Image (tube, grey):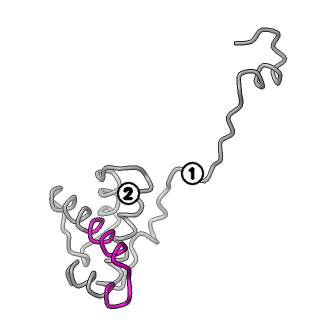
Amino acid sequence: MTIEEYLNYLEAHGRAEKTLRGYHYKLHQARRALVDGGLSDDPAQATDNTFLYLRRILPGTEDTVKQILRAWDRYIQWSTGRQVMANMDLLWNRTQVQRTFISTEDFSRMANFDVMF
């Protein structure tokens, strides 16, 4: 099964044009990275190491890389029926942590400093 067949499947099942463009870009970017690295782009041969390689080599933010890996995993699942990424338990940075920043004045009051920074 090819990437184009998968994209045709998504289109036949009502995916929006924007979604199809996103999948096209992500899947071809993953495929290109695998081929350039000397790895197989055959979904049947995808392993944990394939995903670890992609995670390390793909440019972009963590969220971008995660989206590409998920798209590649869905393509593998559609082609072979296997979910590789679900069994890997990859650790990602905790992006949901809300950091609270305080002003220098507030910090000085909290620390009971007499002198401001």
Q: Residue furthest front?
A: 17
Residue at the location (71% across, 22% down)?
104
Residue 43 picture location, percent across and down: 25, 76
Residue 111 picture location, percent across and down: 81, 20
Please give the residue where the numbered disc 2 appears in the rendered image. Answer: 65
Residue at the location (32% across, 77% down)?
75
- Check residue 19 for magenta coloring: yes
The residue type indicated by label 1 comes to Arg
Q: For residue 27, which quarter of the picture?
A: bottom left
Residue at the location (46% across, 72% down)?
86
Q: As displayed, is residue 48 above or below residue 36?
A: below
Q: For residue 16, which quarter of the picture?
A: bottom left
Residue 29 picture location, percent across and down: 24, 62
Viewer-proximal residue among 96 and 104: 104
- Distance, label 1 to label 2, CA atoms, is 15 Å
Q: Main secondary structure of the magenta part?
A: helix
The residue type indicated by label 2 comes to Val
Boundaries of the magenta span: 10-27
Q: Secondary structure at mark 1?
A: loop
Residue 15 appears left or right of 91: left
Q: Rate crowding at label 1 as few (under 14), some (14 to 19) or many (20 or more) other CA atoms within 10 Å.
A: few
Please give the residue where the numbered disc 1 appears in the rendered image. Answer: 94
Viewer-proximal residue among 76 and 102: 102
Q: Rate crowding at label 2 as few (under 14), some (14 to 19) or many (20 or more) other CA atoms within 10 Å.
A: some
Q: Quadrant of the N terminus?
A: bottom left
- Residue 113 circle label: none
Residue 53 picture location, percent across and down: 30, 56
